[in-house]
Image (tube, rainbow, N blue to C red):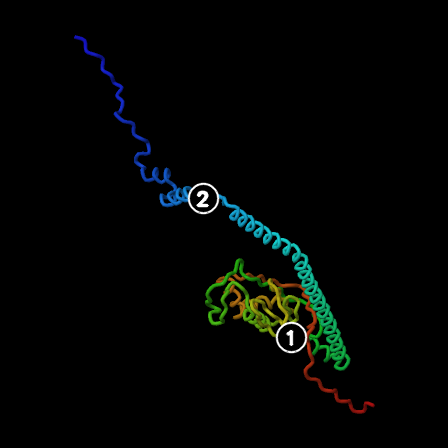
Amino acid sequence: MSQPPHNRSTAPASYARPDASMSLLTHVMDHSLDEGYAEASARREAEGTAGLPRTLKAKLALAAGLVLAAMVVTLGAAQTRVAAPVLAKERQELIDRVERADGRADGLERDIERLRADVAGRQRAALKQQGGDQGQRVALLSGATEVRGPGLKLVVDDAKGSSSGGGGKPRENTGFSDTGRLRDRDMQRIVNGLWESGAEAMSINGQRLTALSAIRAAGDAILVDNRPLVPPYEVLAVGDRKRLPTAFQDSVDGQYLHVLQESYGIRYTLSPADEVRLPAASSLTVRTATAEEPKKGAS
């Protein structure tokens, strides 16, 4: 007996929405306006107060408010446009005043340098005239004259990418916060070490050192006789080119510089030189002078 064919396609009794499991999100999307706001809007529409004003008085008030707002914006823009040239003129006047002041300061600085060089030249001439060979030797030792001869060249520079950090040996008691930068006390030790190793004359970045020279700090800058230096620092020393470099490296201060290089990354190069030229000290001042006693029999 034949059986009726089996129908394999069965349809569900009711169709389920794909977002049936997200009823909360569906409700929020379908009812984005709160019911309280919807009721208030419907009430205003029923009372006739929703939308633009309908009475003549309300329309005139709205128009007056719009005209007033436009006037305020227009007046503000006009005042800004009028004041802009005045502000630009005042700014340019201030810039001109600063530039004129800088020009006068530069001129005074040049006059000071010229007068200082003239005074130093007269002092050297007077020492040479009155003292003869002895005056020339005194002028040489005091830094009042130019010097050239064999010696060494020492170039010292800050560490690459130096940044603030805690102190430590060999500068843990100096109060320095940036151990990657060369400081005035480091330069003092380097200079003293070169003097002790046999240097006869010395300069730093073209500034001649004398017995009265002072190496100090002003902020992060190193000053030599109140003149700021910019790294790298080039130290030139006149002396025995064969013995001076070795004697400095073996000294305590030479070892100190080596520790700064190994521990803090401070860079330096030391090389002997066949000839170095040192300028005369421009700020040399004669503090004490005595008249030469006349020789017997001199008229």
Q: Which quadrant would residue 108 be assigned to in this image?
A: bottom right
Q: Residue furthest front?
A: 56
Name the quadrant of the N terminus. top left
Name the quadrant of the C terminus. bottom right
How many circles with numbers are drawn on the protein?
2
* 197, 287: nearer the viewer: 287
Q: Callout 2, which amino acid? A: Ala
Residue 97, image x, y percentages:
69, 65
Residue 240 appears in the picture as rendered: no
* 169, 135: nearer the viewer: 169
Judge the density around disc 2: few (<14), some (14-19), many (≥20) Cα neighbours within 10 Å: some
Residue contact between numbered discs 2 and 1, judged by CB atoms under 8 Å: no
Which residue appears at 36% of the width and 43% of the height? 35
Q: Earlier in the sequence, mark 2 or mark 1?
A: 2
Q: Which quadrant would residue 214 be assigned to in this image?
A: bottom right
Q: Residue furthest left?
A: 1
* 15, 247: nearer the viewer: 15
Label 2: which residue? Answer: 50
Q: Is residue 183 above or below residue 28?
A: below
Judge the density around disc 1: few (<14), some (14-19), many (≥20) Cα neighbours within 10 Å: some
In the displayed structure, does residue 281 sit left or right of residue 36?
A: right
Q: Callout 1, which amino acid? A: Thr
Label 1: which residue? Answer: 210
In the displayed structure, does residue 117 sit left or right of residue 272?
A: right
